[in-house]
Image (spheres, rainbow, N blue to C red):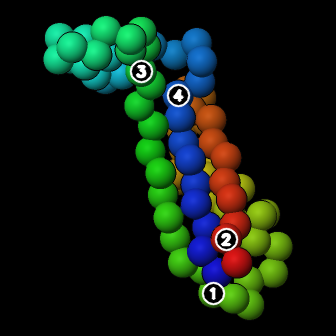
């Protein structure tokens, strides 16, 4: 089975990379872009016999994939 994990900065955390992207898009003529936030997408293939997939994904996120002090995460399981 496949899982997708989305990691983004929490709403109150400054995102200088996102600000740079928004400014650059504005300079390129895309003035409608008022803000941008940068995140990451992690796709992984999991063994089909894993029990408690959601529990395992939560542990992966909290131990390695996301810095839970400044980032939030969500995941989806694709059969």
Quadrant where the N terminus is found in the figure? bottom right
Q: Are marks 3 and 4 in contact (CB under 8 Å)?
A: no
Mark number, residue 14 = none
3D distance between C-alphas at marks 1 and 4:
29 Å
Disc 2 vs disc 3: Cβ atoms closer than 8 Å? Answer: no
Sequence-earlier tag: 3 or 4: 4
> Depth-wise, is mark 4 or mark 2 nearer the camera?
2
Picture disc at residue 36: 3
Which residue is labeled 4 in the image?
9
Residue placed under numbered mark 1 in the picture: 47
Snapshot quadrant of residue 25: top left
> Residue 12, can we see it?
yes
Q: Nearer the viewer, mark 1 or mark 3?
A: 3
The image position of residue 32, as x and y in percent, is 38, 11
User: Considering only order in the chain, which callout, 4 or 1, is on the residue closer to the N terminus?
Assistant: 4
Check if mark 1's residue and mark 4's residue have beta carbons within 8 Å. Answer: no
Q: Where does residue 27 sit, x and y in percent of width and height?
A: 17, 11
**Viewer-closest of 36 and 50:** 36
Residue neighbourhood size for the residue with mark 4, other residues' Cα within 10 Å, grouped as few (<14), some (14–19), many (≥20): many
Q: Secondary structure at mark 3?
A: loop
Picture layout, residue 17 above or below residue 5: above
Q: CA distance from mark 2 to mark 3?
A: 27 Å
Q: Earlier in the sequence, mark 1 or mark 3?
A: 3
Pair 2/1: label in front: 2
Mark 2 secondary-structure assignment = strand
Q: Residue at x 45, y 37 (%)?
A: 39
Question: Which residue carries the number 2 mark?
Answer: 78
């Amino acid at each position: 089975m496949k899982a997708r994990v989305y990691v983004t900065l929490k709403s109150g955390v400054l995102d200088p990379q996102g600000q740079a992207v928004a400014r650059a898009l504005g300079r390129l003529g895309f003035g409608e872009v008022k803000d941008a936030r940068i995140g990451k997408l992690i796709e992984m293939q999991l063994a089909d016999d894993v029990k408690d997939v959601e529990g395992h994904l939560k542990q992966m996120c909290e131990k390695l994939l996301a810095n839970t002090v400044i980032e939030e995460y969500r995941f989806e399981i694709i059969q």
